[in-house]
Each structure stands twice: as structure tokens, then as C-alpha cells.
Image (spheres, rainbow, N blue to C red):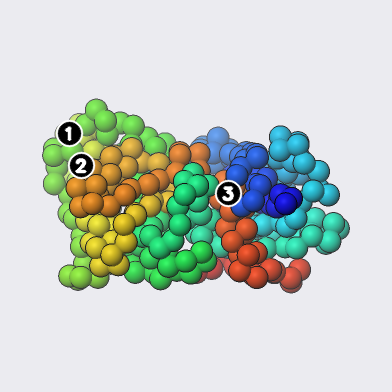
Amino acid sequence: GGFFITLAIESSCDETSAAVLKNGREVLSNIISSQIDVHKKFGGVVPEVASRKHVENIDMVIQEALDEAHVTLGDVDHIGVTYGPGLVGALLVGLSTAKAMAYATNTPLVGVNHIEGHICANYIEHRELKPPFLCLVVSGGHTHLVYVKDYGDYDILGRTRDDAVGEAFDKVARAMGLGYPGGPIIDDISKNGNEKAMTFPRIYLEKDQFDFSFSGLKSAVLNYLNSQKQKDIPIKVEDVAASFQAAVIEVLVNKTIKAAKLKAVDTIVVAGGVAANSQLREVLKEEGEKEGFCIKYPSTKLCTDNAAMIGCAAYYNYLNGLISDLYLNAIPNLKL
Ligand code: KG4
Ligand code: ZN
């Protein structure tokens, strides 16, 4: 039989990305053009600037993805594209490009939910992975505990009621003047810090449910930083970072393992930008394996935003008959 070729496009935030996949799980190319350096000087993503940069880069990124995969547009069997959640202007650049290409080449268009893409990064990394399993999705915008029943079939067991985990990392980092994005920096400097130096709150909310809350922890860290500043006491950023990170990870790991037991799965996977966090990976693996679970996460490149994960999700949507029409619009607050 022939191959099934997916071309995928992702532009929901600050990475312009295009990828080509073979039979849904094999990545032939995954080009990521990051705008981090552009947004760094503003301390965060500036939506209008993001849209403009996507417009400047997208054609080149797509051409590079096709070239590296040694395919032409004529070989493409369907086009997958993120249509939400994300920044509306940024989403529209990828979506309009995908629609134009689908129309011009008479190729099926498949809209993809960005969060679903993050989960599917695990199918690319782990070729043997099959539902059912539990997935902890932790990114800059989302924190979800998801029971993946089947391809494209999800039960949300819990979600954050306020800040996403990545958002909390970025805000704490910014308060200490560490730069953007803060997650990787906190990860890095925590290695030289004492995670027991301060005891920040672990917020579990009501017993036996799986929602999260991180704004209280974030405020506790910001209050601590302010009080030290007022007293003119120098701050040991490594210790604050490590203590904050430990508080986040303890709650994430405990709730995830509890949910996995409830659903009686054997496998727990992690997805999203914060899945790149080295301490989260280590602690979840250790605690999860102690309880008999198999723990998996994508390589760092597939954790943060990329089009390959979108292509994999598009492939399963397509198999499930979920083909979009050319009226598909961007939905900034799209739910899983
Ligand atoms: O998934 P992603 O690339 O974009 C969204 O869909 O939000 O996630 C970006 C988030 C940022 O908040 C960033 O600080 C965080 O992931 N992040 C990390 C690490 N690498 C990226 N957080 C903690 N530790 C890391 N190593
Ligand atoms: Zn993302």
C-alpha cells in the first residue's frame, strides 16, 4: 500500500511551525521558527507582533518542511491545522494559509485542537502507545488531567481553576527578573537551589477531585519576594525557584497518580511545554513507577509547540471522519 502523507501547520502562539508526517506517526520533517527572541524584550508574547511574524515566516517554513521531507504539495493527502485555542490573530495566519492550500490543491482540510495536539506528541514519540491511558497536560495556557479513552475520545477529570502551570512558572520567573520564558530558566537554576529552603503552599482543593489552583502558590512566592525586598534581604533566586517548583510538582504528581489509580490505567503520559521540566519528569517517573505505572513523555522538542504533534492529531481526526470545510474559523478559547 501507499503512504498517507500529512502536512501540518501550527501558529497558535509564538512558534511558526510546519511538519510532514507519514502514516500519522512518522515525522519526515518538523520545522519550528521560534519568535522567542522577538518577544523576550517585552517580557512575554505580544499578540500583534506574533501575527506579523507568522505572516513573514509561514510560507518559508512550509516550503522548508516539504523540502526536508522530499515531498511536493501533490503528494500531500490532507492538511492539518490548529484552529484553537490560542491567539486569534496568530491562529488566523496558519488557518488561512492551510485553507488556501487545501482549496488550491483540492486536498482535505482537518482542523486540530492545539491541546489534543500536545497529547498526540506522545503517539509520535512512543510508536507502541495506544489508548486508554491518563495524560497530564501542562503548558503555558492549559493544565488538564485527561483520561484518553480512545483516539480522539477524552474525559477531562480536572483542570486549573486559575493560572496554568507554565503561566505560574513564567510569572514567578518574571518577578525575580529571570527573563522569558521563565519555565526553562527556573528548571535550570533550581538544580543549584534548595527546595526545602522555603515552604510554599501545596494547594489540593477539595478532597477526591482533580482540579488545580496555582494562583495562591504564585501569590505566596510574590509576597515572599516583596517582603524580603522591603526588609532589604537579598533573595537567593535558586532557592526560591527550587522551592516553588517543588510545590508545583508535588501537587501535579500526587493528583496524577491518584487519577491513574481511579481510572485503573497502566500508563501515564505527560504533554505540553512544562512536560519538558526535568524535575517533573524525574519525580513523576519515580513516584509513578513505585505505584506500578508506566510513565512516558515526549522528547523536549515535541513537548513545546510544534506542527508534528498537530499532524498526528489531524491523522486520527481524519480516520475518525472529522474533515473540516473551508468555513472553519479560529476559536481562541476552544475547549478539548
Ligand atoms: O506548550 P507550550 O510550548 O505553549 C503553550 O501551548 O502554552 O508551553 C509553553 C510553556 C511556557 O510557560 C514555558 O515557560 C513552559 O511551557 N516550559 C517549561 C519548561 N519548558 C517550557 N516550564 C517548566 N520547565 C521547563 N523546562
Ligand atoms: Zn502549546
Q: Quadrant of residue 194?
A: top left
Residue 266, horizontal then vertical, whole percent: 31, 57
Q: Quadrant of residue 215?
A: bottom left
What is the crowding at mark 1: few (fewer than 14 residues within 10 Å), some, or many (at least 20)? some
The total of numbered circles placed on residues is 3
What is the crowding at mark 3: few (fewer than 14 residues within 10 Å), some, or many (at least 20)? many
Residue 90, horizontal then vertical, whole percent: 63, 54
Question: What SS does tag 1 mark?
Answer: loop
Of all residues, the one furthest to the right in this rendering is: 104
| Res 319 seen here | yes
- Depth check: 230 or 288 in front? 288
Of badges 3 and 1, nearer the viewer stands: 3
Which residue type carries mark 1? Answer: Asn
Reading the image, the residue beneath label 2 is 243
Reading the image, the residue beneath label 1 is 194
Whole-number angstrom distance, CA of label 3 to CA of label 1: 40 Å
Reading the image, the residue beneath label 3 is 25
